[in-house]
Image: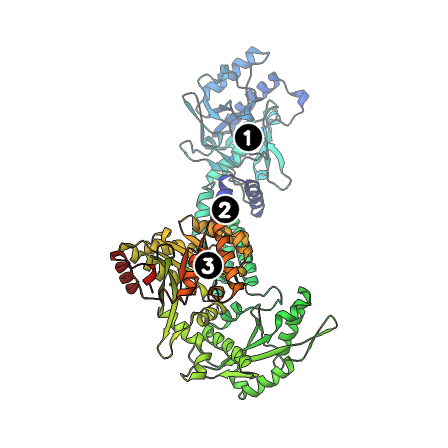
């Protein structure tokens, strides 16, 4: 659609019209059509010195008499006739014209506004009296070519047929004629009028029942360019003969830009809509391109003038966009540092495979960050490629994928490796040897995990192989292989992603709401939505365990989408129940890299109908924001809805002053590590007091989380903290429970001293 719209815009501003002219010129050279022979052209080939009005009129009189004697069917005089110094001659000429007015037509320009007519002399009215008048007007393009001539022209209240329509007996035509220059104009019979008038031995039989056009007698006849290879000049009268010959052949139709754009655009869209297979589409693109070539030759053969360059630009623009798309796509599938295919490419290559004949192997390189600290980015790439090449030992044709972090992956056919454990242990021993980069030996510490399970999609098997590689490190086992997702305690830990995939697909990730208390009033003023996953066999799974797994395998957006929907729906539920309580929702900082999170939040607001002023987004791990400018732009877009932002876990490495300074937060949430020690540690007490004062100075809300005792709450109250949250105050609750709590609070609130 983009290609079609751009081509349509180009057609509207005629930017490619010179290319259309070039196409038409080329078409005129492909075929060579014989003229009908029905028309003859007479002109004056004598020198300029000989041309006088008397000689011209004398030649014209004698020529007309001889043409009539020869039996010419029609005589069109396309040259200005003026009075001469011989009145008697002029009178005889006028009388002769008038007597033969049934088969003599005088032609002249009738449109004085045309630039082509500005310097031309006009026929004296004396000769026009009582005669049929035709229009010799035409319009040439910016290069001087005449491609089309109107069938008639209007001057005042009178309509004059064009010379070509008179010659072709098409005076009732309503559409312009597009000249078919493949008609060989050099084969149209042409004679010198003066010689014909004086030559009594001229074979006049060749003129019987012919249509004669006389032009260029006065020496000021116009000339036009003809696309004959050299773009030579030719008398304009000859253009009318070519137009008449075109009409006689039944040709000269014109196809506009809109028609060609619609036709070729529709064919392209139809083919793309019907054909889904990439190979079939390639054949279609070839046939679609061949259609342009066929149109080019067929239109030249049948004398149809087509504006097709703009339609051809669809293919050029479309091809450019496709190339750009594939270029970007290739880069999406390639890790920029190692130049190896990434895990997105791994899923692409194996997601649709419905057989279990292969094992997915993941190698995890430990302490990679420490290795990279001492070498340049170029050396890092060489290091990674050397590690990858070692993993292909024994199968040089195998492809190794790299996720951009610590993990490499590859696929091995099960049939070729019946003892996979031994093979991987040997491979690890070889791959773990030191790598030499720029004459420096760099250690490689590696564990390997593999998945040999059956009846699971590739994405699940990749995740389980990653989990196996992680477990191998933790258990100091060099290689760990998952054969199937059995429900025993050990294998269950490795199959976390498999169960998580099922939980997401079956919408079994839920939320609980932990109340937040306004310290000054003791009233519940909101709640934090906490993700909860209760497995059928293992019970409640800690969020720290499954959220990290979601991030690792690219399912964080899916998890966030579900948590946002449930949280916003809970906010709407509290709103409908008449409670003015805000809901805080955790969103990872790594999701603030593009507008997808803003789109998701806006769509969820629209779908749930929640009040955005009662929603707070808690940004976790804000130190992972790589581009503060981009994150701020996204947050400001979201803030326009009325949603506020909180910086979570403030005071530890994952939430820092840099993020607080650059991003538009309205709330600072003090990490539980300091809150828990506030009554026992002077250092923790000083840090918390400083953070509360910082929030006050910035005029944002301070929130303390992880309050476990009455003493902690009282100390925070003394420090001036705004909001409190923790197990001492309230544990996470279901929506129905918090509604009941708010209802009781609304009816009768016992006060801060008795709360909890």
On the question of residue 593 being in view, the answer is: no
C-alpha span from label 1 to label 2: 40 Å
Q: Is residue 508 left or right of residue 421?
A: left
Residue, far right: 439
C-alpha span from label 2 to label 3: 51 Å
**Point 59% across, 40% down: residue:** 227
Residue, far left: 747
**Point 45% across, 83% down: residue:** 490
**Point 49% across, 73% down: residue:** 350
Vertical order, 442 against 82 (above or below): below
**Whether label 3 touches label 1, CB < 8 Å:** no
Give residue 115's position: percent from left, percent from top.
55, 26
Which element carries disc 3, helix, strand or loop?
A: strand
Give residue 510's position: percent from left, percent from top.
35, 67
Foreground disc of the pair 3, 1: 3
In depth, the one of 73 and 530 nearer the eye is 530
**Whether label 1 touches label 2, CB < 8 Å:** no
On the question of residue 132 being in view, the answer is: yes
> What residue is disc 3 on?
669
Give residue 372's position: percent from left, percent from top.
65, 68
In depth, the one of 655 and 751 nearer the eye is 751
Counting residues from the N terminus, which is met first, the one under dot 2 or under dot 3?
2
> What residue is disc 1 on?
237
Which element carries disc 2, helix, strand or loop?
A: helix
Counting residues from the N terminus, which is met first, the one under dot 3 or under dot 1?
1
Label of residue 6 in the image? 2
**Whether label 2 touches label 3, CB < 8 Å:** no
The crowd level at tag 2 (other Cα within 10 Å; few <14, some 14-19, many 20+) is: some
The crowd level at tag 3 (other Cα within 10 Å; few <14, some 14-19, many 20+) is: many
C-alpha span from label 3 to label 1: 90 Å
Foreground disc of the pair 2, 3: 3
């Amino acid at each position: 659609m983009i290609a079609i719209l751009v081509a349509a815009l180009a057609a509207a501003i005629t930017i490619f019209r010179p290319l259309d002219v070039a196409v038409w010129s080329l078409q005129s050279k492909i075929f060579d059509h014989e003229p009908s022979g029905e028309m003859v052209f007479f002109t004056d080939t004598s020198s300029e010195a000989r041309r006088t009005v008397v000689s011209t009129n004398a030649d014209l009189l004698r020529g007309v008499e001889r043409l009539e004697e020869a039996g010419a069917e029609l005589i069109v005089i396309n040259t200005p006739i003026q009075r001469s110094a011989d009145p008697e001659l002029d009178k005889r000429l006028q009388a002769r014209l008038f007597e033969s007015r049934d088969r003599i037509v005088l032609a002249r320009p009738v449109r004085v506004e045309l630039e082509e007519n500005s310097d031309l002399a006009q026929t004296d009215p004396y000769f026009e009296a009582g005669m049929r008048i035709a229009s010799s007007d035409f319009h040439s393009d910016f290069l001087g070519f005449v491609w089309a001539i109107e069938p008639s022209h209007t001057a005042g209240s009178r309509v004059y047929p064009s010379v070509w329509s008179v010659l072709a007996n098409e005076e009732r035509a309503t559409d312009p004629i597009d000249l078919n220059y493949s008609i060989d104009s050099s084969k149209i019979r042409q004679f010198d009028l003066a010689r014909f008038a004086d030559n009594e031995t001229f074979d006049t039989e060749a003129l019987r029942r012919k249509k004669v056009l006389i032009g260029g007698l006065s020496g000021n006849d116009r000339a036009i360019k003809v696309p004959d290879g050299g773009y030579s000049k030719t008398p304009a009268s000859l253009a009318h003969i070519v137009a008449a010959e075109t009409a006689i052949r039944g040709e000269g139709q014109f196809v506009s830009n809109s028609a060609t754009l619609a036709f070729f655009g529709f064919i392209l869209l139809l083919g793309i809509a019907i054909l889904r297979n990439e190979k079939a589409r390639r054949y279609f693109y070839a046939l679609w391109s061949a259609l342009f070539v066929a149109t080019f030759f067929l239109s030249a053969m049948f004398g149809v003038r087509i504006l097709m360059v703009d339609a051809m630009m669809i293919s050029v623009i479309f091809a450019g966009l496709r190339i750009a798309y594939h270029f970007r796509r290739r880069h999406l599938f390639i890790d920029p540092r190692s130049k190896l295919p990434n895990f997105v490419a791994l899923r692409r290559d194996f997601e649709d495979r419905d057989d279990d004949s292969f094992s997915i192997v993941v190698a995890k390189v430990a302490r990679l960050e420490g290795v990279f600290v001492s070498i340049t980015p170029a050396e890092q790439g060489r290091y990674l490629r050397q590690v990858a090449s070692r993993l292909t030992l024994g199968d040089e044709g195998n492809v190794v994928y790299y996720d951009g972090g610590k993990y490499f992956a590859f696929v091995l056919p099960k049939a070729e490796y019946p003892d996979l454990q031994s093979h991987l242990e040997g491979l690890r021993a070889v791959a773990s040897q030191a790598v030499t980069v720029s004459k420096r030996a760099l250690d490689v510490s590696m564990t390997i995990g593999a998945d040999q399970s059956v009846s699971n999609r590739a994405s699940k098997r990749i995740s389980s192989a990653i989990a196996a590689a992680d477990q191998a490190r933790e258990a100091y086992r060099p290689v760990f292989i998952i054969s199937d997702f059995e429900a025993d305690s050990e294998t269950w830990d490795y199959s976390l992603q498999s169960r998580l995939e099922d939980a997401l697909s079956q919408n079994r990730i839920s939320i609980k709401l932990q109340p937040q208390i306004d310290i000054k009033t003791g009233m519940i003023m909101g709640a934090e939505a906490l993700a909860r996953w209760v497995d059928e066999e293992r019970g409640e799974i800690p969020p720290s365990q499954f959220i990290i797994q979601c991030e690792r395998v690219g399912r964080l957006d899916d998890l966030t989408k579900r948590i946002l929907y449930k949280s916003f729906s809970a906010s709407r539920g509290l709103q409908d129940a008449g409670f003015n309580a805000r809901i805080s929702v955790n969103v990872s900082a790594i999701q603030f890299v593009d507008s997808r999170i803003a789109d998701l939040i806006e769509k969820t607001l629209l779908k749930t109908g929640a009040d955005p002023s009662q929603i707070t987004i808690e940004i976790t791990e804000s130190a992972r924001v790589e581009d503060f400018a981009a994150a701020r732009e996204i947050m400001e877009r979201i803030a326009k809805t009325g949603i506020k932002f909180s910086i979570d876990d403030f005071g530890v490495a994952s939430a820092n002053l840099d993020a607080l300074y650059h991003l538009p937060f309205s709330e600072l949430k003090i990490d539980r590590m300091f809150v828990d020690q506030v009554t026992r540690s002077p250092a923790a007490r000083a840090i918390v007091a400083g953070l509360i004062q910082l929030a006050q100075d910035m005029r944002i809300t301070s929130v303390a989380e992880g309050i476990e005792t009455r003493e902690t709450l009282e100390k925070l109250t003394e420090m001036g903290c705004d909001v409190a949250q923790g197990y001492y105050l309230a544990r996470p609750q279901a929506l129905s429970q918090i509604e009941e709590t708010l209802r009781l609070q609304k009816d009768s609130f016992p006060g801060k001293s008795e709360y909890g």
